Amino acid sequence: MSDKKHTIDVDFFRQLDRFTFMVKKRMSSTYAGSRRSLHSGKGLDTVGYREYNRGDELKSVDWKAYARSEKLYVRQFEEEKSLTTHILLDASKSMDYGSGDISKFEYATMLAAGFAYLVTRDNDKFAISTFSQEADITKPRRGRRYLLQTIERLESVKLEGRTNIDHVTNLYSKAISSRSLIVIISDFLDDPASIESAIYRFADHDLLLVQVLDRTESMLTLHGHSRLVDVETGVKLDTYVSEDFKSEYNKKLAEHIARITAACDKVGAEFYTVSTDVPIFDAFLNTISRRMW
C-alpha cells in the first residue's frame, strides 16, 4: 500500500487556465455549462423551423406556414441544457508505477483535474470517483470549491488492489440517473472482456476512455536478464528480455489496444492512449481535440 501524497502543482491550473482561454471558443458544446440546444415543441424561444417528421407532436406544427406553403413545418425552440460529467479514475496498485519522475496515477490525476476544471469553468456538475476492486463513488456537484476539495482528496488516495472494471462500472452505472459524459482514466491493463463489458454498459452515455501508460509499458525497452514484478500481486518473474520477447510484447499490447478501440467504435465512444513521458498539456489537448469546432 502506498502512503505517498499525489500533489498537483498550483501552477498546473494557471497553465490550464491560459490553455482553456486559448481554445474555449472552439470547445464543443459537450463542455458548455449554460448550453442551448434546439428542440421541437415546447421551449423558451422560437429560433426557426424545419419540415415535419413522423413522430413530431402536432401541437408544434405551424399551421400558418402550412396555409402559405401547403407543407408541414414544426417550430424549433431553444432551451437550456446541462450535462453532468462523471470521471472514473483508476486507483489500483498498478497505477502507482512510474519509471520516471511521475507515476501513472499522478499523470492520470492531472488529466482528471483538467476535465473537471473545464466543467467547473462552465458551471456544470462533475464527480471524480476512484476505483480498483471496488468504487469510491462521489456525488456530482459544481463549483471551484468542490474542485479544490476533490483535488485535496485525490492527493491522499492510497493505491491498492487489482482493477475490476466490470464490477466497478456495474456499480457506478446504478448511481447515474441521466445521460452523462463518462470519462474513464486507467491503464486498462485488465481482462479485455471486462473492459468491453464496461464500455457496452455505458453505450447510452457520451463515453471517453483515456489509457495512461508509462513509457516503459507503451514500448518495452528492457533488454537482457531482467526481473519483472506485477505491482498488483507482487509476483516476480526472472526472465531474459530478447528482441523476440520485446516484439511479442509490443504485438500483444497493440492487439489489446485494438480490441478496446473496436469496442469503443461500436458504441461511438472515444479512446486515447497517452504515455507519461508526453507533456501533460499535449496529452490533454489530444484528448479534447475531437470536441473542438
Image: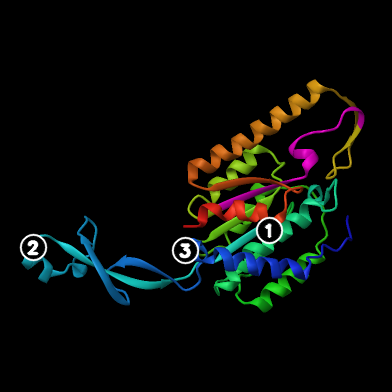
Q: On the image, numbered disc 2 is attached to which residue?
A: 69
Residue 170 visible in the snapshot? no
Q: Which residues are magenta?
A: 208-226
On screen, 217 above or below 112? Answer: above
Label 3: which secondary element: helix
- Mark 1 residue type: Leu
**Location of residue 114 by image quarter:** bottom right
- Residue sitting at x 21%, y 65%: 74
Residue 247 visible in the snapshot? yes
Residue 24 in magenta stretch: no
Residue furthest top as drawn:
244
Q: Earlier in the sequence, mark 1 or mark 3?
A: 3
The x, y position of residue 293, in whole percent, is 46, 57
Task: Give the number of the disc on residue 285.
Answer: none
Label 2: which secondary element: helix
Number of marks drawn: 3
Label 1: which secondary element: helix
The crowding category of the residue bearing disc 1, from other C-alpha atoms within 10 Å (few below 14, some 14 to 19, many at least 20), is many
Distance from disc 2 to disc 1, alpha carbons, whole Å, reads 53 Å
Q: On the image, numbered disc 3 is attached to which residue?
A: 29
Residue 209 in magenta stretch: yes
Distance from disc 1 to disc 3, alpha carbons, whole Å, reads 19 Å
- Residue sitting at x 72%, y 41%: 189
Q: Are marks 1 and 3 in contact (CB under 8 Å)?
A: no
- Mark 3 residue type: Ser
Name the one closer to the observer, 260 or 11: 11
On screen, 225 above or below 266? Answer: above
Q: On the image, numbered disc 1 is attached to which residue?
A: 111
Name the one closer to the observer, 198 or 51: 51
Q: How is the image coloured?
A: rainbow
Name the one closer to the observer, 1 or 101: 101
**Location of residue 227 by image quarter:** top right
